Amino acid sequence: SLRKNGDDQISPGELSPGILDLHSFDTELLPDMSFPAPYDKPTLYRAARGRSFDDSEPYLPTNKQINKARVLPESNFLKSLSVDKEKACSVAKIKVVVRKRPLNKKEIAKKEEDIITIEPSSNFLTVHETKLKVDLTEYVEKHEFVFDAVLNEEVSNDEVYHETVEPIVPAIFQRTKATCFAYGQTGSGKTYTMQPLPLKASQDILRLMHHTYRNQGFQLFMSFFEIYGGKLFDLLNDRRKLFMREDGKQQVCIVGLQEYKVSNVETIREFIEKGNATRSTGTTGANEESSRSHAILQLVIKRSADGSESKPPRVVGKLSFIDLAGSERGADTTDNDKQTRMEGAEINKSLLALKECIRALDNDQGHIPFRGSKLTEVLRDSFVGDSRTVMISCISPSSGSCEHTLNTLRYADRVKSLSKGNNSKK
Ligand code: ADP
Ligand code: MG
């Protein structure tokens, strides 16, 4: 029941040996996946299956599409993957990256100025804050910052991925737990930055599972939930309320959380969209409410103990993506509304606890203060053992956001302050 796609279909043997990188196809047309030669029909069939939701209706690439694809010599391709693997294990434990978004139409209409300068291809950033003297004349105070990377408004989401998550993906197969946070005030670009990352990461994970770790029994799972007002809700199961429990071995367990086995990027894309649509919307409008919740998307790699299907697979590594609540919400502690005040206090507590946990990690402190908040308790197992943390601080360039921007940069600076000169350490 193969669906014929327009013109001719692939005939095996017509292609030179090597790795056919379907990634270079139009990704809207085909799942992102590469696979080794020979390109026999069953292999293509399996590779292309991700295209349709219904397995009975697979998608086959045409010769034209195949010819457009890059063909890489197999050995080089695999070599580059194993180099990545080594590199991944030497990646800094903590990385702090700042991303500046462009001025938006509203800010331009209000004649707000861009007060952030970034020296080209450097990791320096300057905030130009306009202040008033006692005699009411204006002067500009400069605040300079240095981070592991500083990304200006021209940097694409692909480049953000390359700079942040991509280098740590191979380490997930080596028992590493990695976490990527987006921090910043509401409207600074956290969701814009965060949304594409799990999709790109899962593409790479699936690719590794089909090459370097082929037939080794690895499986990919995903879950997506949010923390709102200190409570947990499953974003892939109609916001069902979840409870956190610790087992005898002090392992965190989120009771009732739906974990889906995923084997193609199309399904993952759908889950991400579904989860985002399910985020707290309340009555006051989507952005307003979702800015008070932390959204946590986890990709988990598991493997059966002896490669057999009989035993339940065990967790090997984990990659978590956290779209944090708007940092300004932590200051909602004087609001007239009690509910808002309490939520603000909870957010404040979680962002402070998060900072303390990352600092403790970086300091190789034996004691990690998880208990400070629900967020850090939930992330507990990502902070112990071999872990990697990437903090992406998002900032708005506008003069109107100066105070929030300085707060965000100072928070990022505090997270990072101890990691200077520490970067070569595992
Ligand atoms: P947050 O999640 O921090 O509240 P969003 O990610 O929703 O902020 O971003 C606010 C708006 O700015 C959105 O309309 C988004 O598309 C836009 N935006 C954010 N970052 C960028 C960027 N780097 N380039 C272009 N548009 C951006
Ligand atoms: Mg958002």
Image: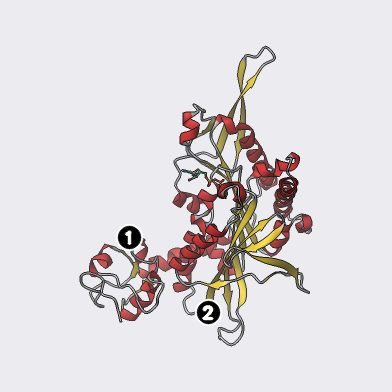
Q: Quadrant of the C terminus?
A: bottom right
Q: Nearer the viewer, residue 409 or 237?
A: 237
Q: Secondary structure at mark 1?
A: loop
Q: Which amino acid, mark 1? A: Asp
Image position, residue 256 (x, y; %): 66, 72
Q: Nearer the viewer, residue 422 or 256?
A: 256
Q: Residue at 75% x, 39% y: name it.
A: 334
Image position, residue 364 (x, y; %): 73, 55
Residue projecting furthest to the bottom: 310
Q: Residue at 45% x, 66% y: name it.
A: 265
Location of mark 1 (residue): 26
User: Does residue 383 appear anywhere in the picture?
Assistant: no
Q: Which amino acid, mark 2? A: Gly
Q: Secondary structure at mark 2?
A: loop
Location of mark 2 (residue): 217
| Other residues around mark 1 within 10 Å, as few (<14) / some (14–19) / many (≥20) | few
> In the figure, is residue 216 to the left or right of 315?
left
Instruction: Work out whether 247 lies above or below 413.
Output: below
Instruction: Work out whether 288 lies above or below 399.
Output: below
Instruction: Work out whether 118 lies above or below 53.
Output: above
> In the figure, is residue 162 to the left or right of 10?
right
> Which numbered disc covers residue 208?
none
